[in-house]
Image: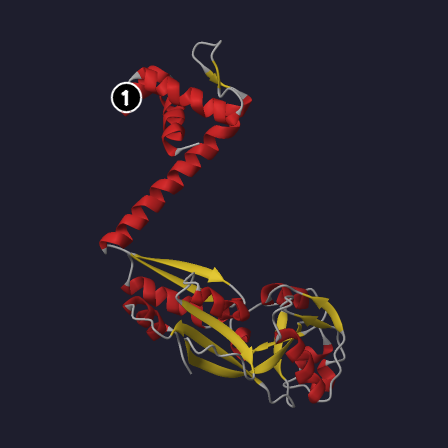
Amino acid sequence: MNLRRLRYFCEVVDSGSAAHAAETLHVAPTAISMQLAQLEQHLGGALFDRSRRPMELTPLGKFFYPRARELLAQARRLDGEARGVATGRHGWLGVGFVRSALFSVMPSAVRIFRKSFPEVHLDLVEVLSEYQPALLQQERIDIGVGRFIGDFDRPADLVHTLLFEEPFVAAVPIGHPLASRKAISAAEFASMPFILYPKDGRSPFGPQLLSMVREAGGELVVGYEAVEIHTALALVGAGLGGTLVGRSIAENNRADVTFIPVSDIAATTTLVAFTRRNETRGLVAAFLDVLPRS
């Protein structure tokens, strides 16, 4: 299958006949017929019912047509974007981010950057902190925004920029007896089922939360595990338990969840930006400049 055959097929459908398609594409009708025959041979079935006048699409043709049009549209977009990057009219910037950054630094950074660089294609990749260094080294992304508790691995070929450090707060259901408190202890928080996140074998974040509460005198019982923080907060809102999040996540968040300081947990969480050490692209520096810092 190639794009020319897809284009010829879609033009026949759009124009109503092979003859009209040949006129539109400025090719001989025999070229249209040859390309359609080769496409049908490749697919293993007829795309048109040629016993009818005008020709009608077969079930295979009806299935294939919208998908072929979508693929052609994607190819045109890719061609335009790639040519723009190659000629300097456009740019491309890959930004990986942990989902909790959507509650704090990412929305404002993207908004400000897009205003200054409207022609730059921003490829936003949601990815856990532990996977970001490899994506940077593979040049899949240019900037990573990750969240950590305590010390973390710092590859020598990457530069780490501290964005901010913040305390944890407890997220509890709005109707829970603790929801009206100004502050609670780790032991009080541990009285409800704990919703652990992220559910990923490479991330130490969840086990670190458990250890943090244990050291403060509370023994958590995991009631549910969530793949990411949005799901964890939704489970809290449903009244299934509580979890711990950075304080910035409490701002402008769910109406069915209350966020309460935990008085005896001193540990903090850190938001960090990663870039390659040998990075020289101005777009990378420009995005770093608009990431909020405390």
Number of disc labels: 1
* Secondary structure at numbered mark 1: loop
Q: Where 68 sits versus 207, above or below?
A: above
Q: Where 71 sits versus 164, above or below?
A: above
Residue at 34% in and 41% down: 76
Which one is in front, 249 or 278? 278
Q: Where 169 sits versus 237, above or below?
A: below
Q: Where 245 sits versus 216, above or below?
A: above
Which quadrant does the C terminus fall into?
Answer: bottom left
Amino acid on which the number 1 mark rests in the picture: Val
**Residue that numbered label 1 is attached to:** 27
Which one is in front, 211 or 44? 44
Residue 276 position, x and y percent, is 39, 72
Dot 1: few (<14), some (14–19), or many (≥20) neighbours within 10 Å?
A: few
Residue 283 position, x and y percent, is 30, 66
Q: Residue furthest front?
A: 156
Residue 190 position, x and y percent, is 74, 80
